Amino acid sequence: MTSTTAPTGRYVLALGVSLATVLFLVLGIGALGIIGDGDRDAIYLAAPAVALIVAVATRFSPRGMALAAGAAAGTTVVAGVVAVVIVALDRESASLLDVAMLTGMYAGLFAVAGWLFWRVG
């Protein structure tokens, strides 16, 4: 995509998947929680923050957005590892299986968005 052309349909689809994933993540944290009660779920908000930083740094180019979505997926996995440690230490929070499955789901959605952006570029 050059600076003089409008975004392609594939780019818009990939952007939609990315934004839907972030919205799904934020609503999931707010409504249900991943780790449990309290503000411990905020560690998962690092993923959209990293994605935004990388996207701005790469000027929202398709390859840059693929990198941003990949970075968000990786950050989600790191947040999930931290969450598993928190759950293992605090027996009254969510189950390890729930945390692992939700982390995998969000990381997978970010990875799909990255793949879609990669197909654009």
Image (cartoon, rainbow, N blue to C red):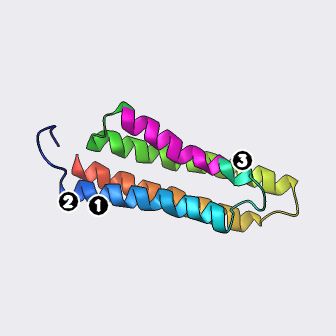
Residue 27 image position (x, y, % from top left): 57, 64
Q: CA distance from mark 2 to mark 1?
A: 6 Å
Cβ atoms under marks 2 and 1 closer than 8 Å: yes
Residue type at the position of mark 3: Val
- Going 40% across and 56% down the picture, which residue do you hit? 18
Asked whether residue 16 appears in the rendered view, the answer is yes
Residue type at the position of mark 2: Gly
Q: Earlier in the sequence, mark 3 or mark 2?
A: 2
Q: Earlier in the sequence, mark 1 or mark 3?
A: 1
Badge 3, how many Cα within 10 Å: few under 14, some, many 20+?
some
- The local secondary structure at tag 2 comes to helix
Residue 115 image position (x, y, % from top left): 34, 54
- The local secondary structure at tag 1 comes to helix
Compared with 10, 73 (above or below) is above
**What residue is disc 3 on?**
82
Residue closer to the observer: 55 or 108: 55
> Residue placed farthest to the top in the image?
57
**What residue is disc 1 on?**
13
Quarter of image, res 110: bottom left
- Going 61% across and 59% down the picture, which residue do you hit? 103
Q: In the rendered structure, which segment of residues is drawn in magenta? A: 43-56
87 horizontally vs 56: left or right: right
**What residue is disc 2 on?**
9
Residue type at the position of mark 1: Leu
- Going 74% across and 52% down the picture, which residue do you hit? 39
Residue closer to the observer: 113 or 43: 43
Judged by depth in the image, the label closer to the viewer, 1 or 3, is 1
